[in-house]
Image (cartoon, rainbow, N blue to C red):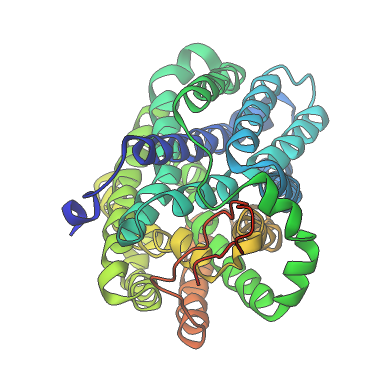
Amino acid sequence: MAIAALSGWTREQKHVVVASFLGWALDAFDFFLLVFVLKDIAAEFHTDISDVTIAILLTLAMRPIGAFIFGRAADRWGRRPTLMVNILLYSVLEFASGFAPSLTVLIVLRALYGVAMGGEWGVGASLTMESIPPHARGFVSGLLQSGYPTGYFMASIVYGVLFPYIGWRGMFMVGVIPALLVFYIRRTVPESPSWSKEASAERGGTLTVLKSHWRLGIYAVVLMTAFNFFSHGTQDLYPTFLQVQHKLSPHAVGIIAVIYNIGAICGGILFGTLSERFGRRRCIIISALLSLPVIPLWAFSDSPALLAVGAFLMQFTVQGAWGVVPVHLNELSPDTARGTFPGFVYQLGNLLASVNATLQAGIAAHYGGNYGLALAVVAGSVAVVIAVLTAVGTEAKGIVFAKAKVAVPSVEPTAAA
C-alpha cells in the first residue's frame, strides 16, 4: 500500500515532503529537549519541577498565536518563504534558551519559542498536502506526523549520549541545528501549486473565511484539544516519571524514550497509510481505543523492560491516531484558508491542553509523587473522548484541492471543485 502511494511522484514533490518532514521533526526535537531536563533546571534555579513545567505550558499556549500569524503569512505571501522564516526563528530562540540567566528569562524565551513553533506544523502540512498526488495523502500524513516522534527520538539520543557532557544548557544550544534546513528549502523546494500571489489577493481576509466556517472550526478545536491532551499527556512527563518514580539513569531513560518513539513512528505511518483504504475517522477511532488496554503496562509496570514495552505500544497507538490528523484537517479545511485553518485549530487545541504538564505534575504531587496514576488518568480519559468526537464528526477523504488561478486574457479562470 505504501509502495503504491509512492508512485508517480516528481522530484520537486519529494523535496517538499522531505523538507516538511524535517521541519516538523527538528521543531519537535527542539521542543522535547526541555522535557528531559526539567529536574536539572529545577535544581539549578532552586525551584520545583512543577514551576519549570510552566515553560511547557507557555510554549503550548503561545503556539496558536504563531499558527495564526504564520498561517496568514502563508496564505498571503506563500507557504515556502513563510516556512523558511519560521524554521530560522524557532532555531535561534532555542539556542538563546541555553543562555537563560534565570527561570523567568527561560520561561519568556520558551513562550517566544512557542510562537515560532506554532507556525511550522500548519504551513508545512498545507505545503505538503497541496503538492503531493492525492492517492499518497494518507501515507504522507502518517509520515509527516511521524516527524514529531522522530524529533523526540533525536532528543532522546542527544540526552542519553551528550547530556552528561554538555548539561541542560548545551542541550538547548544543540537546538540551533535546524536553521541549516533553510538552505535546503531555498534551493530545492517549490511553492505550493495551490497558491499564487494573484489568487491570494482575490481571496479576501482569512478571518472572513474562518468566520464563515465557524461550526467546523469549533469542532476541530475541541477535537484537537483532546488530541493534544492525548499526545502531551503521554509524552511530556514520561521521562520525569521514569527519573523520579523509578529512579532510572539518564542512559536508561534515553533508551526507553528511543524505544517508544520508534513505536510512535511505526504507528503514525501505519495508521496514516491505512486511512487511505479504510477512512480517516475509522482509523483514528480504532487507534485511540487500542491504547486503553495498554495503560496498565505503560503506567504501572515495575521493571524497565516492561515499561519499555508498554511505552512502545502506547506511543504506537497514540501516534497512530495522530498519523491521520494532517490529512484529515487539510481535507476538511476551506481551500482559501488552508495555510491558516489546520495549524490554527490544531494550535488552539494546544492552548486548551497546555495545562497538561502542570495538571499531571499537580495530580502526582497530590498522590505522593505517583506520576503513573496521573499519566493513566489523562491518557484513558482522552482516548475515549477522541473516539466519541471522531465518531460524530465528518471527513472529506479524497477531496480535490483547488489549484492556483492563473490569469489568462479573455478567459475566465477556473478552479477544481
Image side of residue 292 versus residue 104, left or right: left
Question: Relative to 116, is 326 above or below?
Answer: below
Image side of residue 239 versus residue 173, left or right: left
Going 79% across and 19% down the picture, which residue do you hit? 101
The answer to which of 246 and 285 lies nearer the viewer is: 285
State the residue lying farthest toward the front: 410
Q: Position of residue 39 (x, y in %)?
A: 60, 34
Residue 396 seen in this snapshot:
yes
The answer to which of 124 and 294 lies nearer the viewer is: 124
Q: Position of residue 139 (x, y in %)?
A: 31, 56
Going 45% across and 31% down the picture, which residue do you hit? 155
Q: Position of residue 262 (x, y in %)?
A: 29, 44
Q: Position of residue 327 (x, y in %)?
A: 44, 62
The quadrant of the image that shows the N terminus is bottom left
State the residue lying farthest toward the top: 165
Question: Relative to 183, is 27 above or below?
Answer: below
